[in-house]
Image: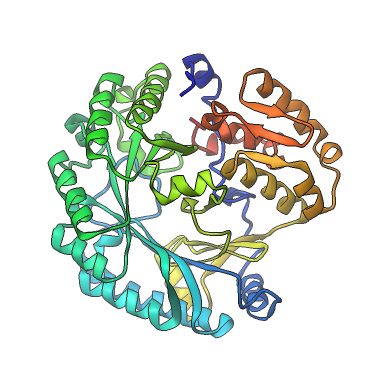
Amino acid sequence: MQVITTELLTKFDVPGPRYTSYPTADRFVEAFGEPDYLRALDQRRTGPAASTRPLSLYVHIPFCESLCYYCACNKIITKHHDRSAPYLRYLSKEVDLHVQHIGAGQSVSQLHLGGGTPTFFSDDELGELMSMLRRNFNLVAGGEYSIEVDPRTVDETRLQTLARLGFNRLSFGVQDFDPLVQKAVHRVQPAEQVFALVEAARRIGFESINVDLIYGLPKQTPESFDRTLAQVAQLRPDRIALYGYAHLPERFKPQRRIVVVDLPGAANKVAMLARALAAFDAAGYDYIGMDHFALPDDALAVAKRQGRLHRNFQGYSTQPDCDLIGLGVSAIGKIGATYSQNAKSLEDYQDLLDQGHLPVVRGLAVSRDDLLRRAVIMALMCQGEVLYESIELSHLINFREYFASELQALRGMQEQGLVRLTDTGIEVTSMGWFFVRGVAMVFDKYLQADRTRARFSKII
């Protein structure tokens, strides 16, 4: 692996979008509502590609038993598990309303349960949820069916149940193995527990196991994080997601409980990232892009090598670019040339469904320029390459004229060894992959005059 200098890491230690969509979700507007979303659903059913366009489902389960101080997710902290059953009924109502517009039996090749803590649901409730989805959709063989798992909420028996329900991918929230860090973020889970669960998941036969890590948490040091990195290398999950902690207490109330003086400084944060990149490379992981790593034989690494990598609201995916139906409070969807988001509060979400409405409260109809820039940004993020001719034929533009100022901005990145500008296109170098968010930001027209980048996490 090419050496990534701390100087370069520090230079790109700036806020920026994660580009799980373009335009990004902060650009959604309340002028887009249920009528716009219904039109998009109807067009999906009646349009020319109605029978062949793939479909993905995301289900947001917001409940958590305890609060993790770093969390920026939409969640409801409660120990009252009797709140699950009513929520399940509302999910069923939401599915029924969708089926009225797109028809029953639509083929689904990707399903993801996120949160919150999806395993807050009991085994029976998860079984009821999966049965309800299967009654209304066709979950095709060979699809990706994943669930986020809090290690504190499952044992081997529960993992067997998840496999029996059809899940073939797991994502364990680890963040850090250090007990002092776990205590500082109010998420104590012994390493032995995670190791036992991953071993059990392998015995059961899950196709891919992911582990989430966060650097930049309170009480972390480069040395303490080295110990976590060594444990992760020993654990050897199929995939690793490594996120930089973004301390935004003015936006996320739980983060106000973090003691600011306990947070590592910028230099230590950069050192943790640099050491993580080296450790995962030494352990044999392929760098997928942004903050994702995978073993060479994992489907994600194979897809990257074959140029089949895609990106959606759950991050990198092997599945083709597809329509996404978001179910549950705050869930985001993508249908055709539109994005949509459900009500963020449980009360508003339930009230709208009680009135017979889909709970979409904001979104965006994507413009021609948005579609063009999305194609360029996703090509950079997923393939690390943009071919001028391909974009020109698809969008009927002259690339060099349309993006003259952007290409000029990339010349500085070319001098830094991050990209190559050729006669036929733009190539992200092997070193540039580590800064691909920064490369993509050049083509984000919303950022050009934007003075509020602090709303985003830092790009490294």
Going 41% across and 16% down the picture, which residue do you hit? 267
Could you say which is closer to the camera, residue 212 or residue 110? 110
- Where residue 139 sits: x, y (%)? 42, 74
State how many labels appear: 0
Q: Is residue 294 visible?
A: yes
Do we see residue 59 in this rendering?
no
Q: Residue at x 25, y 59 (%)?
A: 205
- Please determine whether, in this image, residue 58 is positioned above or below residue 275: below
From this view, report whether residue 21 is shown above or below residue 112: above
Residue nearest the observer in this picture, 221 or 82 = 221
Occupied quadrant, residue 194? top left
Question: Is residue 247 left or right of 235 when viewed as pictured?
Answer: right
Q: Return the x and y of residue 303 as percentages of the image width and height.
A: 50, 49
Colour logic: rainbow
Quarter of the image holding residue 42? bottom right
Look at the picture and state if 299 lies above or below 400: below
Percent from the top left, x then y, of residue 140? 44, 73
In the figure, 456 relative to 222: above or below?
Answer: below
Seen from the viewer's position, the closer of residues 437 and 261 is 437
Question: Closest to the observer: 120 or 276?
Answer: 276
Q: Position of residue 238 (x, y in %)?
A: 33, 45
Query: Residue at the spot x=67%, y=49% of the render?
Result: 374
